[in-house]
Amino acid sequence: MRPRRWGTTAAALAAALACNGGLQPTPPCGTGFVGVCGTITFRGAVPDSTAGVYVVAYARFPQQPSDLLSYTPLFPQPLPLPGDSTTPYSVGLPNGRYEWVVAAWRKQGTFDFSKADSLFKEAGFYKDGADTTTHGSGIVIVNNAGTASINIVVDFGNMHPISYYFP
């Protein structure tokens, strides 16, 4: 019986070696992707005046309204707006530490920073489960393998104007 057991073990070892390293873990956001990924859950009706919803990240949580212009990526892509549902997303970001990953709703209209409070609203954000802040500053570290499970709930019935975060 021993020769048969060794023969089976040898065959399994040969098969594993033939796989050039065997099964390797898949990066969480896909091969070669650097950034964040996860799911966006949309709740409520999409407002008729919606120009788009964008996921952006801030290395530091904005301390004043002018800091709102320091987001990454510089030219974010709008998310698909399917209504009440959950959909995967990914946003390319440079390696680094981010204090706020937020879904920003943009109203239709010409951008003017003096009207930013009416044109942009925080629609949702990533929040670490232990976080008790109003803005959900769950720290996100992006590395070369991508950072997964950065899940965000966009609630169209509970959006906040940007002045909500500044006294």
Image: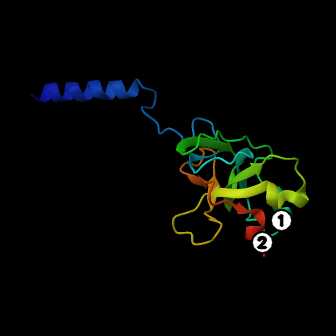
Dot 2 lies on which element?
loop
Looking at the image, the residue that sits furthest to the left is 1
Q: In this view of the protein, which residue sits in the foreground, 26 or 52?
A: 52
Q: Is residue 31 above or below residue 121?
A: above
Quadrant where the image shows the N terminus: top left
- The 10 Å Cα crowd at callout 2, few under 14, some 14 to 19, many 20 or more, is few
- The 10 Å Cα crowd at callout 1, few under 14, some 14 to 19, many 20 or more, is some
Residue 163 lies, in percent from the top left, at 78, 67
Residues at circles 2 and 1 in contact by the CB criterion of under 8 Å = yes
Residue 119 lies, in percent from the top left, at 80, 54
Residue 28 lies, in percent from the top left, at 53, 43
Left or right: 104 in relation to 156: right
The residue tagged 1 is 65
Residue 126 lies, in percent from the top left, at 60, 58
Q: Is residue 115 above or below residue 2?
A: below
Cα–Cα span, label 2 and label 1: 7 Å
The residue tagged 2 is 166
Q: In this view of the protein, which residue sits in the foreground, 117 or 57?
A: 117
Quadrant in the picture for residue 29: top right
First in residue order: circle 2 vs circle 1: 1
Q: In this view of the protein, which residue sits in the foreground, 138 or 50?
A: 50
Q: Amino acid at mark 2?
A: Phe
Looking at the image, the residue that sits furthest to the bottom is 167
Q: Residue at x 63, y 45 (%)?
A: 144
> Can residue 70 be seen at all in this image of the molecule?
no
Q: Amino acid at mark 1?
A: Pro
Left or right: 141 in relation to 14: right
Q: Residue at x 17, y 29 (%)?
A: 5
